[in-house]
Image (tube, coloured by chain):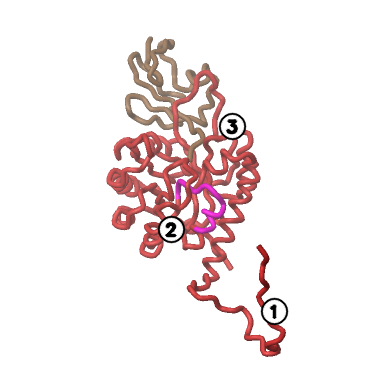
Amino acid sequence: MEIRINGKIQTARDGITIREFLETCSIDPAKVVVEINNSIITRDSFGTQKFKSGDRVEILRFVGGG
Amino acid sequence: MNDDLIIAGISVRSRLITGSGKYSDDNIIKDVLDAAECDIITVALRRIDFENPEDNILNHIPKGKVLLPNTSGARSSDEAVRIARLSRAMGCGNWIKIEVINDSKYLLPDNIETIKATEILSKDGFVVLPYMNPDLSGARRLVDAGAAAVMPLGAPIGTNRGLRTKELLQIMIEEINVPVIIDAGIGKPSDAAEAMEMGAGAILLNTAIATSADPVGMARAFKLAVQAGRLAYKSGLGSESKNASASSMPASFRTSSSIPKPTTVRP
């Protein structure tokens, strides 16, 4: 299926959870925040919530700032 | 004597708040924070870099610091509220620096949108520290809207131009009863000391440390300047006068012959 992650279309396997996707990308789930279709996903849902085709996903982390 | 900075009932020792941006190597940040001895650190929220997924500023900030995410990138109150809520979902506390900017040349904040965001977020349980143009009525509205501190700029972000807005800052310090934190534009330790001598609650800076040749040394210099300025403010500065005033009583032992005559300088 295709999902839009951080503005770019990516292909992901059907039924993949947020946690599985992050692990595939070597991203530490404890240090990111995920938003799907403008709704914030709480971290304790990462293991159960699945991406759906057409989802608009933002995966964000803290960077240096002033 | 305890002279902690108190924001929203939370007490911190250091009156120097530092940013974590613009470092040529993020590995230096821990040493900078140690040298600055600061308790509050600002960060920003951005998309993950899939090319470098393990890169994360949290890896460089020691535990126990108060994290102050900013809403940089927001051009409206709605965007600031969204960024604030995403930042809180990171699980690093509920402090937020509101930064609403829609001027790309000077990066000056939009006070009206900032007030709107402050009202929404303070009702939502955030500790709100808004970055603002120095304006007394704007600051009063921010306090009414629930701001835990107000953070007027000394000069535009990243300019290192010092306290260009000094007169307005002084008025705000005198009239506003939450901490007035001078944010942006502080370029030199002497700027920071001057702001603290004026009675500022704290200093927030990033560029002046991050872009110096020796950020660790500069962090220490700013720490000392903030401490010196604060101590001077607490001690009460002496009054200024136009005429000189001798530091000792008049010298009664002096005779007229001992006063040196003016010497003539030959051309």
Look at the numbered disc 3 and give the secondary structure of its residue: loop
Q: Residue at x 66, y 71 (%)?
A: B264
Residue B86, by quadrant, is top left
Q: Which residues are magenta?
A: B183-194
Q: Label 2 marks which chain's residue?
A: B
Chain the render paints brown:
A
Q: Is residue B188 magenta?
A: yes
- Distance between the alpha carbons at the discs numbered 2 and 1: 54 Å
Look at the numbered disc 1 and give the secondary structure of its residue: loop
Q: Residue at x 72, y 84 (%)?
A: B258
Position of residue B135 measured from the top left corner of the image (x, y, whole percent): 33, 54
Asked if marks 3 and 1 fall on the same chain, the answer is: yes
Look at the numbered disc 2 and give the secondary structure of its residue: loop
Position of residue B222 measured from the top left corner of the image (x, y, whole percent): 58, 51
Residue tagged 1: B260
Three-letter code for the amino acid on which mark 1 is drawn: Pro
Residue tagged 3: B24
Q: Residue at x 48, y 50 (%)?
A: B162
Which of the image's four quarters has the C terminus of chain B?
Answer: bottom right
